[in-house]
Image (cartoon, rainbow, N blue to C red):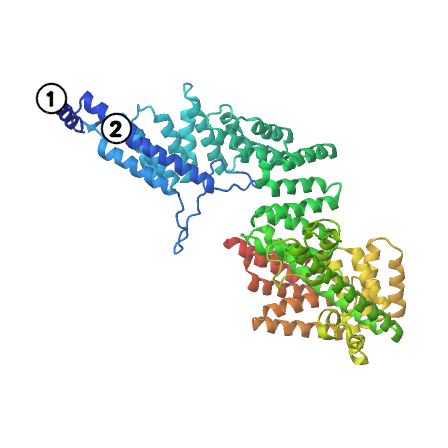
């Protein structure tokens, strides 16, 4: 028996040795290498490829605010000469899959008499090409696919290989070649459903590169007729829904998104975003109410926690049509639910800022716009550039509103009688004491709740609402008030404590901020301390008054010219006139009020016109009103404006761009209606271009061309624009 066993083992070893040869075309050799290739090397290689795809999908983030790419594979732009490409961050599993494919080819290829005898080698080359494709090495990938097509024309995987070859050609920007190859493949009526699905998806991918939307829709519709790949089918349906919406085919869009919702085992990220996209398609009040209820149900589902920021944002957008206050609540919940700074969070901050902007709450709007600019990762988009300009314009409003409010407060106190001053500051001191007492009570509550007073834990709690201070209404209200007193009404955002961020204090006592917030703590309850700080020098009081008047005038002009807020502009200028400012402010204020009331067809326009033309007939404003087509500048004012322009031009030559921009802006307001304004505008544009770059320069030139088309400066701006565009 032992001899028989030895003989069998020896025979098996001999058989194994001879079958390992890749040069002998025998049945045993072919089967051995075929099985070893398929169930050993290729099996491990396919597992590595699947692991790589799983990792790739896990790290890939779709931007559902834009039309999704057909294939979720981020390809970096080709680097320019002298520039370093981004480091390849492809999962290492693709490298392992490539190694297994190479090993299969090197060890098990049976190329005998120029014909491959191992039926699994074509699969090895296909795996090699896929691994290189997903590693974004498209030239080596297409070499692998071409090798299969040339050397294995009758292989079982030939049709699948043609699809991969076409996809690689698309990545190499050979869309026409890919379309031709895929069209030939799709003419085969016996094509397997999976290959047909992949081929139609690849065709859509090619036409998407060529911006042929109708063809993209056509082939995506063909691709989703079968459902072999749940991930890709859901993605194709999602893209269809987005494209239909862009073509204003809302019903078709909703149908596509509903198919995703109904698709069994579809990836959940597509399902939840299909609900959100359907909410975007809502166009009437009834549908908005129904969709709001649906979003509320989704929000209550714990499974949707990762998507709460998007769900709240969309719910806020629906609610905004009918209930602005509730919409703001939902927007803020969206911010709270955002776990990181992303595009969604940017949009939420911007939406709240826009609401505040539309309600003329410019300080609040500015704070929210600051939050957007702080967290954005792409500052070169048109949206962010526009937001920056909007925010820069707000800066002046915020500064001048602050000056107006502060100086009004100071002058109000200055105007009080001695007894009224005593009453005012006595009440303020009492308020401070009351706040101090509330603070002391809160500290006692927190001391008990923190466990310091454990021995008294069995005593009755005299303050209702629970032992933990968050359950105590009085403690919470005091905490909120204390926060506002220290920090102001800051929006809910990251890095809110940074000193450079806007402080919005809505609880000002109305006195000078230096009196209220910077007093020596040892004297904060002494009445004399505050009384001594009230200005008494007439020169100082006049200076405060003039600064206040100038702020009101500039606010009126900015609200009128930059934000088109006519009501706000009128209110600031009319309030300015109640202060009896000097003629240097009262005349231009009356002129601007005349113009705004004329636009509104208000009879007050005639009153201001008569005031100017009758009482100040020689002023330039009267001449503009009576003779708008004439040259309206006196020699003296012309000389003054030309001198100012010349001085600014020299500053520009000295590269003092910030100063030039600021002074040009003031000059444009100062000399409004005069021909020299276009000169200041062009000089300002050049300074902005030097400081902020080409895109900002082009935008300023566009404005000059639009607003001053018939002036020499407008023609010069157009000429420069044409030169810039010809070189891009």
With respect to residue 575, does 198 lie above or below? above
User: Badge 2 local density, few (<14 within 10 Å), some, or many (20+)?
Assistant: some
**Of the numbered discs in the image, which one, if any, rests on residue 400?**
none
Quadrant for residue 406, please give it: bottom right
Query: 270 and 543: which one is in front?
Result: 270
Work out whether residue 397 can be spotted: yes
Q: Is residue 367 left or right of residue 534?
A: left
Q: Residue at x 86, y 58 (%)?
A: 605
Residue on which the image places disc 2 = 36
Q: Position of residue 25 (x, y in %)?
A: 17, 24
Q: Position of residue 675 (x, y in %)?
A: 71, 65
Query: 674 and 128: which one is in front?
Result: 128
Determine the residue located farthest toward the left in the rendered image: 3
Residue on which the image places disc 1 = 2
With respect to residue 410, does 328 lie above or below? above
Query: 653 and 231: which one is in front?
Result: 231
Q: Check disc 2 and report its element: helix, strand or loop.
A: helix
Query: 568 and 6: which one is in front?
Result: 6
Q: Residue at x 56, y 64 (%)?
A: 691
Q: Is residue 125 left or right of residue 265?
A: left
- Where's the N terminus, which quadrant? top left
Quadrant for residue 194, please give it: top left
With respect to residue 94, does 527 lie above or below? below
Q: Nearer the viewer, mark 1 or mark 2?
A: 1
């Amino acid at each position: 028996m032992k001899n028989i066993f030895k003989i069998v083992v020896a025979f098996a070893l001999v058989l194994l040795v001879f079958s390992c040869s890749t040069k002998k075309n025998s049945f045993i050799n072919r089967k051995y290498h075929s099985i070893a290739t398929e169930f050993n090397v290729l099996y491990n290689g396919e597992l590595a490829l699947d692991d790589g795809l799983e990792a790739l999908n896990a790290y890939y983030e779709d931007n559902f605010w834009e039309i999704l790419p057909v294939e979720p594979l981020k390809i970096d732009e080709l680097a320019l000469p002298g520039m370093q490409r981004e480091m390849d961050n492809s999962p290492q599993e693709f490298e392992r899959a490539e190694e297994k494919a190479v090993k299969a080819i090197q060890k098990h290829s049976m190329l005998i008499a120029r014909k491959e005898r191992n039926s699994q080698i074509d699969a090895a080359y296909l795996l090699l090409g896929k691994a290189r494709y997903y590693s974004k090495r498209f030239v080596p990938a297409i070499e692998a696919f071409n090798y299969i097509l040339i050397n294995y024309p009758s292989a079982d995987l030939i049709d699948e290989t043609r699809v991969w070859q076409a996809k690689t050609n698309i990545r190499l920007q050979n869309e026409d070649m890919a379309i031709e190859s895929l069209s030939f493949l799709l003419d085969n009526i016996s094509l397997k459903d999976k290959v047909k699905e992949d081929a139609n998806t690849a065709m859509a991918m090619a036409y998407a590169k060529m911006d042929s939307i109708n063809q993209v829709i056509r082939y995506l519709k063909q691709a989703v007729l079968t459902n072999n790949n749940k991930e890709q089918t859901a993605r194709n349906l999602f893209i269809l829904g987005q494209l239909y919406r862009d073509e204003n085919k809302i019903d078709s869009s909703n149908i596509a998104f509903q198919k995703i919702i109904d698709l069994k085992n579809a990836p959940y990220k597509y399902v939840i975003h299909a609900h959100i996209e359907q909410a975007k398609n809502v166009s009437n009040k009834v549908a908005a109410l129904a969709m709001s209820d649906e979003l509320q149900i989704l929000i209550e589902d714990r499974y949707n926690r990762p998507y709460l920021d998007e769900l709240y944002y969309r719910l806020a957008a629906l609610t905004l049509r009918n209930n602005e206050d509730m919409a703001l609540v939902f927007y803020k919940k969206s911010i709270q639910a955002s776990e990181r700074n992303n595009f969604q969070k940017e949009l939420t901050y911007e939406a709240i800022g826009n609401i505040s902007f539309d309600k003329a709450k410019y300080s609040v709007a500015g704070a929210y716009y600051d939050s957007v600019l702080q967290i954005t990762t792409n500052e070169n988009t048109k949206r962010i550039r526009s937001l920056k300009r909007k925010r820069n314009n707000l800066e002046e409003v915020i500064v001048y509103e602050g000056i107006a409010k502060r100086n009004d407060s100071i002058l109000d106190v200055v105007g009080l009688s001695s007894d009224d001053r005593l009453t005012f500051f006595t009440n303020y001191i009492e308020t401070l004491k009351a706040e101090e007492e509330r603070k002391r009570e809160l500290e006692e509550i927190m001391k008990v709740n923190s466990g310091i007073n454990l021995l008294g834990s069995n005593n009755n709690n005299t303050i209702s609402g629970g032992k933990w201070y968050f359950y105590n209404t009085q403690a919470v209200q005091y905490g909120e008030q204390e926060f506002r007193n220290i920090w102001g009404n800051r929006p809910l955002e990251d890095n809110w404590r940074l000193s450079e961020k806007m402080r919005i204090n809505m609880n000002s006592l109305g006195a000078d901020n230096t009196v209220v917030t910077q007093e020596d703590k040892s004297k904060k309850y002494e009445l004399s301390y505050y009384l001594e700080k009230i200005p008494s020098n007439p020169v100082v009081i006049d200076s405060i008054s003039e600064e206040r008047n100038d702020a009101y005038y500039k606010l009126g002009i900015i609200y009128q010219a930059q934000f088109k807020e006519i009501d706000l502009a009128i209110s600031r200028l009319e309030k300015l006139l109640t202060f009896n400012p000097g003629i240097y402010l009262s005349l231009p204020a009356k002129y601007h009020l005349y113009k705004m009331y004329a636009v509104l067809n208000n009879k007050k326009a005639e009153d201001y016109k008569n005031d100017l033309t009758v009482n100040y007939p020689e002023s330039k404003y009267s001449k503009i009103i009576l003779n708008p087509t004439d040259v309206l500048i006196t020699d003296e004012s012309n000389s003054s404006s030309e001198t100012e322009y010349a001085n600014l031009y020299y500053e520009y030559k000295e590269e003092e761009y910030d100063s030039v921009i600021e002074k040009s802006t003031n000059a444009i307001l100062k000399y409004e209606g005069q021909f020299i304004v276009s000169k200041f505008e062009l000089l300002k544009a050049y300074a902005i271009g030097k400081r902020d770059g080409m895109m900002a320069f082009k935008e300023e030139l566009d404005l000059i061309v639009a607003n001053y088309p018939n002036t020499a400066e407008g023609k010069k701006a157009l000429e420069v624009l044409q030169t810039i565009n010809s070189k891009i």
